[in-house]
Amino acid sequence: MGKALAVIDIGMTNKKVAIYNLRLELLAIEKKSFEPLIAGGIESHDLAGMESWFFSVLKAFSRRFDIAAIAVCTHGATFVCTDAKGEPVLPCFFYTHEPGEAFQRRFYAMAGDPEALQAATGTPNLSALINPAKGLFFARELYPRAYEKTELALPYPQYWGMRLTGKAGVEGTYIGCHTYLYDWNKGGYSSVAEKLGLDGKLPSPLRNSWEVLGTILPEVARRTGLSESTIVTMGIHDSNASLLPYLVKGFGTEFIVNSTGTWCVLMHPQEHYGFVPEEIGKVVFFNRSAYNKPVKTAIFLGGKEYEVWTGVFRAQEKRVLEKRAAAEPSAPDAASSAIEAGAPEASGAAARNASVYADIVSECSSFILPEIVPGSGQFPGSIPQAVEGGIRYGLSDIEAGRAKPAFLADPAKAKAVLNLSIALQTIVALERAGLADRQKIFTEGGFRNNAEYNAVLAAALPENPLFLTDMSEATSFGTALTGLAALEGKSPSDLAGLFSIAQIPAQPMRGLGGFEAYKKEWLRLIAERR
């Protein structure tokens, strides 16, 4: 049995443990979701439950594979305050919690001017607690005594590294991702970190994602069945893990990765850090790549938008079918029809449904507007709505059955309007990330399987070749790259020959001649904000 790598991949929705061999081939994967804990009425992460599950899965895998290294990646916007041994002293709050406008004002009164902070830290003003410095400030306000007991403020991947090895560390991809805690100009921790009282509590120095943090603790070895010689990497931010294979393959800077999931993250590697004046105040920021280079980035909750609205479609269709069934007992089964309405289309369906899109674009009357979580994407202040014939229908009214836009009763049309909305949000995010003519776009993640969405994008961006990749678990794969590099004492770039990235052209949808007029009206409706 050859040696293997374990990847702990922590998303907001799914937690995964994946096993790769030393040829970077996926051998096995387990997934689980966890219900949030409620602390002080606020959703928080079940750290203990997750840890128990990770260890139990690793124990099961240890009987099948000779695991020599563990690499960790996590979603963003999350820190854990711990004692010196890595035991949490505070709840780990969901970044989706919205503490209100008064809190936001208090935060910036403490931290400084948002635009000056964006210029220095690469971080825009995001809603809720999506800026981790806000999460730490929130914890300090809510639990001041416990906050004072904090010995370590650990970025989320490094918290898990601490649990595995007993060692604290920090690397560039997480501390440099819309945290307000890293100052690009200083090349170190920011004034916000100082104002939060984090001197000496944030680990240092900054290390590479593929460096070895340490070997697993004896207690971890006992609970998992792994050897005490099993190494653990520094950890990596999940979006940057998805980007890493492209950097390893030498794609340079003339491309953008459209990494799709709960969040759609549009990443454009750059040679140099810095905003142009008109970008300040916009929802655009800089990530740090695994190579500690700037990555211009724009985000929006595309997967969440899709999930919420398809749930609305199912509920709407269910109500229609229930009424029909009451009058006609032989009506089709509501559940199966509703699920079909919300599912992504397989290859070839985009062409079959092109006429539906052409009619919607030509009529320029039916729209879905962002944002499900206000302030989370490219349109701060936009209210989630459906618009039909100039009449606005709030999402909450639709969900409660108080409003019924006619297009929602037609599953094909409803889904097409939603895909148009997600595609338009993607286009704006691409523009904010600095898209130029002839630059390639790579779509990976969940929307890779949405043929209609990709066909709309390809039609709307004729100057940009749009490709789908073959990376079904892109985040885990990029993380496995860091694990293998750590195990072999190499840079990830030395591993370029072990894999390829398929470039599958997305075929443009025909008949969207009125798309620019539709886009203009969609943007006008958002700008009205009512």
Image: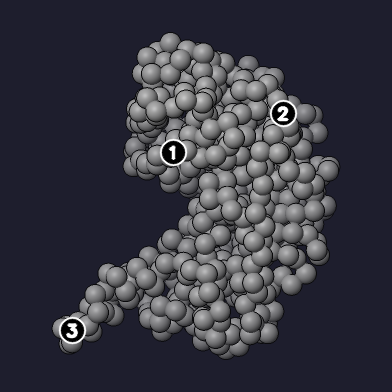
Numbered mark located on residue 491 in the image? 2
Is 186 or 475 nearer to us in this picture?
475
Task: Give me the residue at 52% from left, 29% from top.
Answer: 5
For the view shown, which residue lies furthest in the front direction? 1
Q: Is residue 68 left or right of residue 266?
A: left
Residue 115, position as x, y percentages in the image: 73, 46
Amino acid residing under circle 3? Ser
3 or 2: tag closer to the N-terminus: 3
Query: From the viewer's perspective, is residue 44 above or below residue 434?
Result: above
At label 1, the amino acid type is Ala
Q: What's the CA distance linking mark 2 and mark 1? A: 25 Å
Crowding near pointer 3: few (<14 within 10 Å), some, many (20+)? few
> What residue is pinned by disc 3?
330
Check the image and report above or below for 172 versus 329: above
Estimate the x, y position of residue 78 in percent, counting from the top left: 52, 36
Q: Relative to 261, does residue 105 appear above or below in the rendering?
A: above
Which image quarter is the C terminus in?
bottom right
Instruction: Identify the residue shown where x is 48% and y is 42%.
Output: 11
Residue at which label 1 appears: 28
Based on the displayed image, in which of its 4 quarters is residue 482 positioned? top right
